Image (cartoon, rainbow, N blue to C red):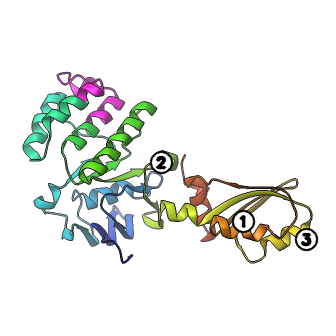
């Protein structure tokens, strides 16, 4: 752990098995408060199970889940500080939005009824309409409205953006950002879509087959890997430029070289200054490209199981 921060959500060697299949396999992760943590992985990677464990919905078979340094399961005091939005939100039979507002008001002392009403109006949802008649996207919107209105410190979101149109997705992200700034909200968002989380996450963990494949700060990842496109005058110049740098991926198309290398922008540029170049450009990396580069280094073909 870094010296300058304390993990407010701490997962230590968590394990959970269903019917002989290990859904979570010795997962250890730390999540800082007031940051957006993204859990990435395909269906079956263990994201939903892990969220349910740290939300106190499931008891782990082994390991420890701590929130604010307290055990989560069977801890009502800690659960008052968190709201869990499932992939398929549950609502009472024949309930309306107004019914769910009344219910969550009785569960969370921090529930803001006025904000619920404002958000329902902003999202264009009818509070007295039966939720059973809502579309999938409208149900997702209602679940988010309930979660935000609860006013909890932690918000756990399982595929929350799935089913929302682009305008609604951006609106939800803006609400998260505002609440993080104004009241210290800490969202933990599980998704199979790297591109969906790229513009909102501070830290990303990649799950695969129940285990943690990678867990890194977004800025550190992007600052530490560079993507270069260039055309060398000769093969000798190419060899000289690449000598002494850690090349993670190198592709050629005709004379055009596309090189992904580990190092800062200035470090990588310095390696190319002493050779003759017909063309040289440092390109921005997407989160997907960073993950592909990092995981290929440790022997995984991440392209096979990242959905985008």
User: Is 126 inside the magenta-drawn segment?
Assistant: yes
Residue for badge 1: 269
State whether residue 262 is above or below residue 189.
below
Bounds of the magenta span? Answer: 120-142
* Tally of marks: 3
10 Å neighbourhood of mark 2: few (<14), some, or many (≥20)? few
Please report the residue visible at 41 percent of the width from the left and 56 percent of the height from the top: 39
Contact, mark 1 vs mark 2 (Cβ under 8 Å): no
User: Between disc 1 and disc 2, whose residue precedes?
Assistant: 2
Residue for badge 2: 199
Between circles 3 and 1, the one closer to the viewer is: 1
In percent of width and height, residue 294 lies at: 59, 65
10 Å neighbourhood of mark 1: few (<14), some, or many (≥20)? some
In percent of width and height, residue 17 lies at: 33, 65
Residue for badge 3: 236
In percent of width and height, residue 67 lies at: 23, 65
Q: CA gap, disc 1 to disc 2?
A: 26 Å
Please state which of residues 133 and 167 is positioned toward the viewer in this rendering. 167
Please report the residue visible at 84 percent of the width from the left and 72 percent of the height from the top: 239
User: Is 257 inside the magenta-drawn segment?
Assistant: no
Contact, mark 2 vs mark 3 (Cβ under 8 Å): no
Q: CA gap, disc 3 to disc 1?
A: 18 Å
The answer to whether residue 301 is left or right of residue 252 is left
Can the viewer see residue 92 in this picture? no
In percent of width and height, residue 24 lies at: 37, 65
User: Between disc 2 and disc 3, whose residue precedes?
Assistant: 2
Please report the residue visible at 36 percent of the width from the left and 31 percent of the height from the top: 137
Q: Is mark 1 on a helix, strand or loop?
A: helix
């Amino acid at each position: 752990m870094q010296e300058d921060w304390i993990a407010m959500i701490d997962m230590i060697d968590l394990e959970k098995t269903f019917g002989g299949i290990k859904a979570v396999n010795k997962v250890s992760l730390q999540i800082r408060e007031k940051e957006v943590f993204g859990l990435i992985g395909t269906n079956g990677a263990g994201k939903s199970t892990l969220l349910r464990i740290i939300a106190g919905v499931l008891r782990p078979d082994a390991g420890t889940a701590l929130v604010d340094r307290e055990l989560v399961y069977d801890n009502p005091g800690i659960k008052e500080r968190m709201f869990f939005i499932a992939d398929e939100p549950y609502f009472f039979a024949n309930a309306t939005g107004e019914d769910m507002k009344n219910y969550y008001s009785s569960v969370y002392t921090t529930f803001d009824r006025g904000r619920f009403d404002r958000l329902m109006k902003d999202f264009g949802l009818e509070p007295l309409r039966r939720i059973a008649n809502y579309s999938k996207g409208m149900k997702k919107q209602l679940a988010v409205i309930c979660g935000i209105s609860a006013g909890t410190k932690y918000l756990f979101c399982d595929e929350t953006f799935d089913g929302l149109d682009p305008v609604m997705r951006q609106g939800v992200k803006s609400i998260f950002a505002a609440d993080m700034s104004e009241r210290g909200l800490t969202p933990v968002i599980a998704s199979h879509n790297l591109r969906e989380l790229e513009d909102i996450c501070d830290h990303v963990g990649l799950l695969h087959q129940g285990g943690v494949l990678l867990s890194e700060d977004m800025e550190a990842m992007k600052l530490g890997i560079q993507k270069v496109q260039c055309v060398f005058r000769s093969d000798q110049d190419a060899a000289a430029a690449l000598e002494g740098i850690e090349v993670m991926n190198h592709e050629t198309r005709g004379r055009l070289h596309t090189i992904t290398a580990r190092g800062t922008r200035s470090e990588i540029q310095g390696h190319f200054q002493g050779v003759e170049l017909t063309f040289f450009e440092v390109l921005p990396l997407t989160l997907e490209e960073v993950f592909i580069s990092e995981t290929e280094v440790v022997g995984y073909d991440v392209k096979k199981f990242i959905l985008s």
